[in-house]
Image (spheres, rainbow, N blue to C red):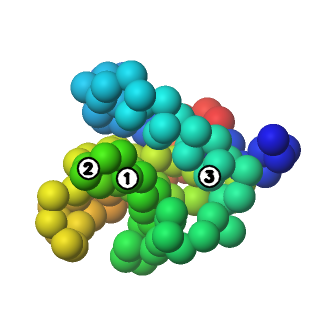
Amino acid sequence: MEAKQYKVIFYLDKRGRCPTDEFLDGLQVRVRAKVEKWIEKLEEEGPNLPRSFADIVKGKIRELRIVFGSNYYRFLYFFLGKIIVITHGFLKKTDKIPEREIERAERIRHDFLRRYLGGEIKL
């Protein structure tokens, strides 16, 4: 296993809720294990993770792509230096990522940065 170059964290809202954990909790054990493996790979490779597994969605928002059986799982994230903040995950059912998922990730990024820069979030 390669050394981790980046650190992945999951976004927490002001009330301490974690959309990523809530999504992961609903997955089967085997699916969750595969997701965890790919999150580790993301920590190792960061922006160098090959396009078939990760891509830029819009602006600063990126996606981690995981296929399990006939299901397509997506985790949206952004970089803050060497920190990767995963905003949330969802089951992708259409060819394109639904605009509402992208908007959600952008809202989360804005909230995270506002709270981080304001000193409310410590990394």
Query: Which dot, 3 or 2, sits closer to the camera?
Result: 2
Residue at the spot of label 2: 71
Q: Amino acid at mark 3?
A: Leu
Q: Residue at x 30, y 29 (%)?
A: 27
Q: Position of residue 108 (x, y in %)?
A: 34, 50
Q: Residues within 10 Å of mark 2 (few under 14, many from 20)?
A: few
**What is the CA distance from the residue labelled 1 to the residue labelled 3?**
15 Å
Q: Judge from the rendering whether residue 28 lies leftward or rightward of residue 33; answer left or right.
A: left
> In the image, is residue 96 above or below residue 122?
below
Q: Residue at x 64, y 41 (%)?
A: 40
The reply to whether discs 1 and 2 touch (Cβ–Cβ < 8 Å) is yes
Q: Amino acid at mark 2?
A: Asn
Front residue (pair 47, 65): 65
Front residue (pair 3, 9): 3
The reply to whether residue 83 is visible in this rendering is: no
Q: Residue at x 49, y 30 (%)?
A: 33
Image quarter of the C terminus: top right
Dividing the picture into quadrants, the one containing residue 18 is top left
Residue at the spot of label 1: 67
- Name the mark on residue 42: 3
Q: Amino acid at mark 1?
A: Val
Q: Secondary structure at mark 1?
A: strand
Which label's residue is closer to the chain start, 3 or 2? 3
> In the image, is residue 36 above or below residue 73?
above
**Extreme-right residue of the structure:** 3
